[in-house]
Amino acid sequence: MKAFNRLMLWALLLGLTFIAALNGYVSSRETGTAGKAYRIEIGRIYEQVQRGIPPEELLPDLNRYTYVNGLSWIGKEAGPDEVQRFFAGIGVEDSNEFMVKPLYADQQIAGYLRFSYRMPGPDVHALLVLDLFLLAALGAVMVLLFYIRKQILRPFHSLQELPYELSRGQLSIGMKEHRSRYFGRFVWGLDLLRQTLDAQKETNLRLEKDRQTLIASLSHELKTPVATIRLYASALADSLYDSEVKRQSAARLIGQQAEQMEQLIGGIITASVSSLQNVEVVPGEFYLSGLVGKVIRNHKERLELLKMELTAGAYQDKLLLGDEERLHEVLNNLIENAIKYGDGRSISITFREEDYRQLIVIENSGEPLLLSELPHIFTSFWRGSNADGKPGNGLGLFICKQLLQKMGGDIFAEPLERGMRFVLVLRY
């Protein structure tokens, strides 16, 4: 704000300096022009007298001159006092200037002519109009700068600390509402982001607390079956049982304890993905064309840089049911997987109808998954044999399945001869 205030002050000072300089330039230019004009008029009158026209005959014609307004003369026979008074400008009005020029006859001085004239200043009316116009322009610039300062810079200045505070985790301080037409939606979005981060922080704290409680509880519960298994395993290894019935009973107990451990481990996995299953889906209606257009725009340029071909088949625009943003998230996930696990050649999106449902088919070229891996592809934390050395956590397709099922749809995977196909099922 201080820098902009200095900018406004400099703009004002430069504007006033420019106006003053322009006034001086116009005044000096007009004065110079007038000086040339009165000299021309004096020259014309002097030339006529030199041609023999008596000065008294020229007196009535002085009215047609702009600057010269008086003419007097003396002969060479005038006395010294008269000549001195003549050259001193006695008889010339104080508001006028005068010039004395000698008259010649047969190359001898015959007398002197004295011209009185007005030295006009600049056109005050024109300068006033010019100054008013320039001051109005300067005023408009200052009003514009003040408007920018009040409506744009001041609201933005009040927001500049917010990203820093958010980065430090200060999420509890709300934001003041702004009526600024430029930042109203921006402020609303930042406050919504703050609220979302605050809610996410609370959720993370709650999940972390639940996770620690779960780990402590399961760690305690796992001790019993582990100790039992170790005991029976040691007894079997040392041949402490003297009959086959006892050995089989110990083996069954080991199996039961192992099953109990599996259940406890399953509880850990269920708890770890419970937050993913609670993802909210907002039911709504949207057009297929809007969804497809958004996906193409988001990935077209990137795929061109990767030298991958993206093709979209023809489709009939329809009104679909579901959460457009979540479905957009699903399609982005599938295209990212196609880029990551495909051979980098092509991705295609096609459309068809089946059983009063809209199907969106995404195919990519590359090595398909093994048939034995397909039943696990939508399981959480599962990754296929083609994922070695590639980043990921095995949750992408699991989340896609969860989202689509909450929208009343579904997703299926099919291996191709050279690639993979994912089919999304959506409701009209």
Image (cartoon, rainbow, N blue to C red):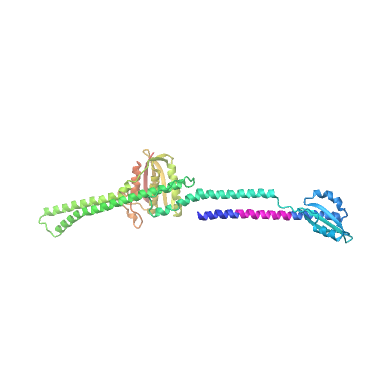
> In the image, what residue occupies the spot 52% across and 50% down?
149
Residue at image coords 85%, 55%: 73
Up-down relation of residue 160 to residue 407 (above or below)? below
Decide which of 175, 267 is in the foreground and name it.
Answer: 175
In this rendering, the answer to whether 75 lies above or below 360 is below
Which region of the structure is painted magenta? 15-33
Residue 219: tell me if it is visible. yes
Which quadrant: the C terminus? top left
Pick out the residue farthest to the left. Answer: 242
| Residue 44, magenta (yes or no) | no
Figure disc tally: 0
Is residue 24 a member of the stretch shown in magenta? yes
Tell me what residue is drawn at x 57 percent, y 54 percent.
Answer: 11
- Judged left or right of residue 151, residue 417 is left
Q: Is residue 363 visible?
A: no
Residue 174 percent across, percent down from the top left: 40, 48
At x 47% / y 52%, what residue is drawn? 157
Farthest right residue in view? 106
Residue 282's spot in the image, x, y percent? 37, 42
Q: Whole-percent x and y of residue 411?
A: 35, 45
Instruction: From the viewer's side, name the closer residue of 225 and 344.
Output: 225
Q: Quadrant of residue 43?
A: bottom right
Expressed as whole percent of the image width and height from the top left, the position of residue 225 reads: 19, 54
The answer to which of 151 and 420 lies nearer the viewer is: 151
Residue 292, by quadrant, is top left
Q: Dominant secondary structure of the magenta stretch? A: helix
**Residue 21 shown left or right of residue 97 in the figure:** left
